[in-house]
Image: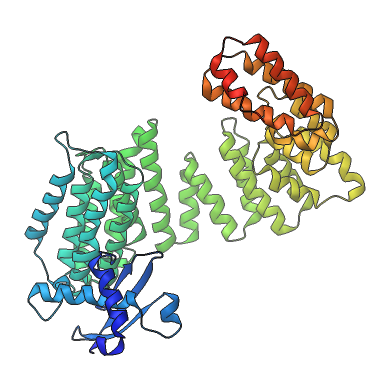
Amino acid sequence: MEWRKCFRAEVIKRGEDYFRSGMVSELTYDLAGDFQAQVHGNNDYEVQVHLDSQQKLRDFECDCPHFQDGNNCKHIAAVLLKWEDAQHNSGQHSSSSNRLRTIPELRQEISNVCWNYIGPDNFVEYEQVYLFAQEMLRFLDHDAEIFLRHQQFTDAFKLTNLLLEKFLGVSMDDDGDVADFCTQIFATWEKIYQNCNAEFRQEMFNWFVEELQHSSTKSEYVESRMELIFYFFRQNFDMPEFRAAKLALVNAQISELEPHCDDFLKLYELEKWLLLKVDLIKLHDSDTELENFYLENWQYDCLKRSYVNWLIARKKYEEATQAIGQILEADDVNTRDRIYYYGCLKSIYAERGDNLRYRNCLMELIQMGDQVVENFSAIKKMYDAEVWSEVCRKIIRQVPNACDRAFLYCKEKLYQELYDEVRQDQSRSLLQNYDRMLAQQYPSEILDLYKSFLNEEAERPLGRAHYRKLVDLVRRVKRLPGGEKAAKELLLDWQARYSNRRAMLEEMGKIG
């Protein structure tokens, strides 16, 4: 397909301007041999290019409005120009982007990238981490995709593991880039796993088993690496041929970790393997065997949760409530777990239409400070308006957090209770949240609270930034009923009392 015949000359010219200005992101190929790229400008647009079996141009599309209206656009022209440039530079008929590079070549290039970013102390500075991650990820977007397209699964897998080793082998000021990098590695593993043959899938399985048996401790990111390896292993290799070896590894890890479960980190690792064993039993064994496993290992909190969820999923509500009741009877159940199990009970009772127990669960959750507004609203729906005004006061008084109590008093228009809550709040943050609303009912009282608070704050010589905050608060006071007079009195008093604080007086002078 000679694409230029489909474009007007001025569109090609504008596409060339975009291409020459570097506005086209690097081409990314998929398994079908098609590729895509982003074109940047006032907005970013994605161009898709479709190739035939001979890797020749077949069709293209863009998500910009101009193309959607039926016109070929400068974005497509820019991408096709970049594609042709890559072909020309390779000296081959196929794009240079399609060239299969060897693992030794890639190892050297990856080492060169690392050399450019890693300092003498094996550390990547914060401002360089994102760029370092993007350069490493280009090997996935480019070379790994080419390997996959040519069904070179061994080299694709070797490349992912080489990148993982190199990237996580250094220290850096991470701002989420490690997690993003690991996510991309995981996605590439998934592509390899889904498309490779049984023989190579067995090789992958053997590699994961080896890694999990002998976890590396080469860098501070060993935890990220092993978490990635573990969760891929957990989510895959479910075919019957892997079952025995997978179960053997799981049992070995559990046996090794169980004697050390008093150590928090060891317990965390143990719980991961216990839940993986649950997955395997669910997949290959009977419900009876699964239930026996849960009950035999009842001492582990992760299995208690898993057991309750399993019962609820099967609508075995009676057994689930009994299990939860047994769990909650223990003295050492922390608040987080209590909230979780009362949330389970809430769902069960809502499903069964047991309104009394449902309401009791809502109250328990409110008293623990969980989703207070949502649970409060759910309770309100269960009462008639005539009795709600008195009931709601009793409920709100049981809310542990002052901010939540104030919000609910405001929502229910209980202004006396809201004022009492604001008055008792020593931080005065509630005063600033509800001053305008309460000033309609309690104008002098709100001004008195502000005067007291502002005078206390004015006594603290904390510098110009602090004085600017005082200025903002005085301006708030001025907007309240009677606030002009109160603000003027405050400022006159401060001018006399703090005449030696030049910065404070300068800031106060900015109040209109």
Image position, residue 175 (x, y; %): 35, 43
Question: Can you see residue 35?
Answer: no
Q: Residue at x 78, y 38 (%)?
A: 437
Residue located at (62% from left, 49% from top): 344
Q: Would you identify the image quadrant in which residue 37 lies?
A: bottom left
Q: With respect to residue 28, does 281 lie above or below?
A: above
Q: How is the image coloured?
A: rainbow
Count of labels in the image: 0
The answer to which of 446 and 230 lies nearer the viewer is 446
Vertically, is 87 above or below 448? below
Query: As rendered, which of 343 and 283 lies closer to the eye?
Result: 343
Q: Position of residue 297 (x, y in %)?
A: 46, 43
Judge whether residue 162 can be spotted in this image: yes
Report x, y in % for residue 226: 28, 46
**Which quadrant of the figure has residue 442?**
top right
Measuring 68% from the left and 41% from the top, which residue is drawn there?
A: 365
